Image: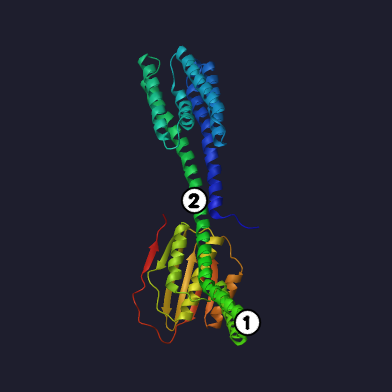
Amino acid sequence: MTPEPAPARDLRRLRTYTLFTVIGSGPLALAMAALFIAGAGENANPLAAGAAVGSVALCTSGLALHWHGQGPLRRRILWAASLALLLAGAAAEAGSGGISPAWGAPAGLLVAEGAMLWSRPGRRSLAVLLGTAATGAVSGFAMGLGLMDFGSLLTTVVLAPSIAIGIVCQLWHYRVAQELEQARGLAADLAIAEERLRFAGELHDVQGGHLQAIMLKAQVARRFQETDPELAASEVRAVEELAREALRDMRAVVGGYRKTALADEIDSAARILKSAGVDATVPDASPDLDEDTERLLGLLVREATTNLIRHAEPTAANVSILEVDAHVTVTVVNDGAAEAAGDGNGLSMLAKRFDEAGGSVEHALDNGEWTIRGTLPKPVALRPRQAPRVPRRVRRR
């Protein structure tokens, strides 16, 4: 069974946490209201208690419909009924001796659901502010009429925005996490598509000239096949040689043996990782090596980059180059590896080529970090160095 990628698992856990937080706000508000109503003792009004239960239940149902993406019509009906019950309960309590702070928590639920229901994303903080102001204004009006004391007013204007802001912020946080996960997946797909386009362009550049030359040689052979058979035969032999060379170059491109510059592959890896949202650290410059060594080390960087995009969920990667004694080592490390993958075709072929060149390829998984390391002997004669190798960081956008 393939383990679930860490970002997907974390998003699923955040969804569960958000659901329990938002829906759990209803029982929490009801418990607060019950404590204040029960504190009235013999003066507790049963009608007010029933209205509080009904208001909280209706508003919580509206939040549940919002979570499941239901349309606004039923939610508006539930919200209006909840508001009516809240006002009726507060009026019933006022008739029996004064309004307690029991309505602060249910009012916070109403403000949160109203912000979700009546405002667009991006304007909900303003909606919460307006709802809080309306709650404070009504409470202040009730205190002016002698129906509520200052302590009840203060408790109400603290409870209502606290519950409303908690619900709205939790839903906003989950929505942002969803959008970030979708963007990360899209960036990874685009990075792979970019690599495919690069490969297609490389294949086109290699084979286009061969095919054009083969076509011209074939036309010459056909034109002189009767008038000058010797020339035609010579052109046919040239076509055969060109076809053989084209096949060799195609195999080289597919197998990765075409001339590859290590610096170009590192720059390509940096672009791909950046577009995939990976925080990557790569060398600022690569050493001057012979063509074969650069080709193999460049292939290692290319294979490691492709593998970590396709088979891992990375957030950070590091490419480093180390020269020790007569050997040069390129190491690529990334996090987000769920399990140790077996040797695929790419790694097996790469290890074989390094072995033939007197080097080695190692890879390992340690605490969620996947490391692939390739070591080759340095060439005897090196070209003069151009610049020191200073690591540079490629930040995510």
Residue at (34% x, 77% y) in the render = 386
Name the residue that disc number 1 marks: 225
Name the residue that disc number 2 marks: 183
Instruction: Decide: is 50 above or below 180.
Output: above
Report x, y in % for residue 220. 57, 79
Q: Nearer the viewer, residue 79 or 60?
A: 79
Report x, y in % for residue 320. 43, 70
Residue at (44% x, 26% y) in the render = 104
Q: Please tell me whether mark 2 sits on a helix, a strand or a loop.
A: helix
- The residue sitting at the left extreme is 387
Residue 390 visible in the current orientation: yes
Q: Quadrant of residue 137?
A: top left
Report x, y in % for residue 185. 52, 53
- State which quarter of the image contains the N terminus: bottom right
- State which quarter of the image contains the C terminus: bottom left
Q: Nearer the viewer, residue 289 or 326?
A: 289
- The residue sitting at the right extreme is 1
Residue at (60% x, 66% y) in the render = 341
Mark 1 belongs to which amino acid? Gln
Q: Is residue 323 left or right of residue 54?
A: left
Q: Is residue 173 left or right of residue 390?
A: right
Residue 142 image label: none
Mark 1 surroundings within 10 Å by alpha-carbon count, few (fewer than 14), some (14 through 19), many (20 or more) = some
Mark 2 surroundings within 10 Å by alpha-carbon count, few (fewer than 14), some (14 through 19), many (20 or more) = some
Q: Quadrant of residue 350?
A: bottom right
Q: Nearer the viewer, mark 2 or mark 1?
A: 1
